[in-house]
Amino acid sequence: MAGKNLDPSSSPRALLGAELRVARERAGLSQAELGEPLFVSGSFIGQLEAGTRRMHIEFARQIDDILGTSGFFVRNCGAAAKSKYPDHFAAAAEAEALAKAIREYAPQLIPGLLQTEAYAREVFRAGHPTATEETIDELVTNRLARAALLHDPTTPLLWCVLDEAVLRRCGDTRAVLAEALRHIASLIRANRIIVQVIPFSAGPHAAMGGAIKLMSFDDAPPLSYAEGMGTGLLFDDPATVNHHALTYDLLTANALSPRKSLALIESTAEDYEHDQHA
């Protein structure tokens, strides 16, 4: 085991996971065998090693004891846990950056990965009406930074299902929403993302309860993330992840086709642009 601490500037969670794998294999333990005294599954240990799960301090202490790593994981747990995102979303955001495929259902707002600067600013200002401009600027910057993963022309696969409410919630900011919808349409036409819209005419559907994000990885089990107002839970339990995957499949079955969804997105943007000019 390395004696020095990890460099926080060099993907600390991924480095910590790599060190965990080395230490576990050196101890002759499988992922399931290490997980047993921690009361977690072998797949959870795999996610720690892949960097898709955050190592909390209580796990770090036990891992140091089990693997005889002289406090290495406790010392470095803090660096790996640092995040610029809210606590309830931090683990999901970091897993998102490592995913090979992301499937997301958005019931009210354009997903963060697809937001424009102006749209993100409107959303944050609505949620933080008394925040300083510096605070809003930081929130917007962090949100836009997440979208950098779309700069790769093929990976990850991003498939979004939008409720029609996402297209209609404009208020007095029609120009902002028009720009945001044009941005989504441009990504669709560039063959970078897949988007479907569930129209109001589809009636009740399988995900009326809130947003869902599904993430799959090359070297770790899949995860799902369910989000509510100021809360969010990341799941690795196979039964829960499979249930969320089925829910998403039902959403796509009830949504408009990608071609018809693109037509609706572009026509809605055009309507907002026309209203703004009028």
Image: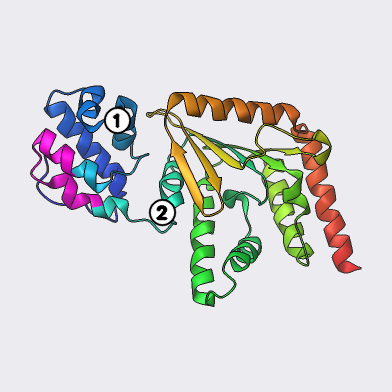
Mark carried by residue 87? 2
Q: Is residue 201 left or right of residue 158?
A: right
- For the residue pair 81 and 188, the one nearer the viewer reads as 81
| Total numbered labels | 2
Q: Give the quadrant of the C terminus.
A: bottom right
Q: Is residue 243 above or below residue 106?
A: above
Is residue 265 magenta-colored?
no
Q: Which corner quadrant of the image does residue 133 belong to?
A: bottom right
Q: How far across and down, in percent of the image, does residue 138 sit?
A: 48, 67
Q: Residue at x 46, y 37 (%)?
A: 99
Work out whether residue 273 can be spotted.
yes
Mark carried by residue 116? none
Q: Residues within 10 Å of mark 1 (few under 14, many from 20)?
A: some
Instruction: Report the magenta residues as a range.
Output: 61-77
Distance from disc 1 to disc 2, alpha carbons, whole Å, reads: 21 Å
Q: Secondary structure at mark 1?
A: loop
Q: Is residue 77 above or below residue 46?
A: below
Q: Is residue 8 left or right of residue 215?
A: left
Q: How far across and down, in percent of the image, does residue 256 sit?
A: 78, 33
Q: How far across and down, in percent of the image, does residue 154 sit?
A: 55, 37
Q: Which corner quadrant of the image does residue 273 belong to?
A: bottom right
- For the residue pair 259 and 246, the one nearer the viewer reads as 246
Residue corresponding to mark 1:
40
- For the residue pair 198 and 11, the one nearer the viewer reads as 198
Q: Which corner quadrant of the image does residue 271 belong to?
A: bottom right
Q: Residue at x 73, y 47 (%)?
A: 185
Q: Residue at x 28, y 49 (%)?
A: 12
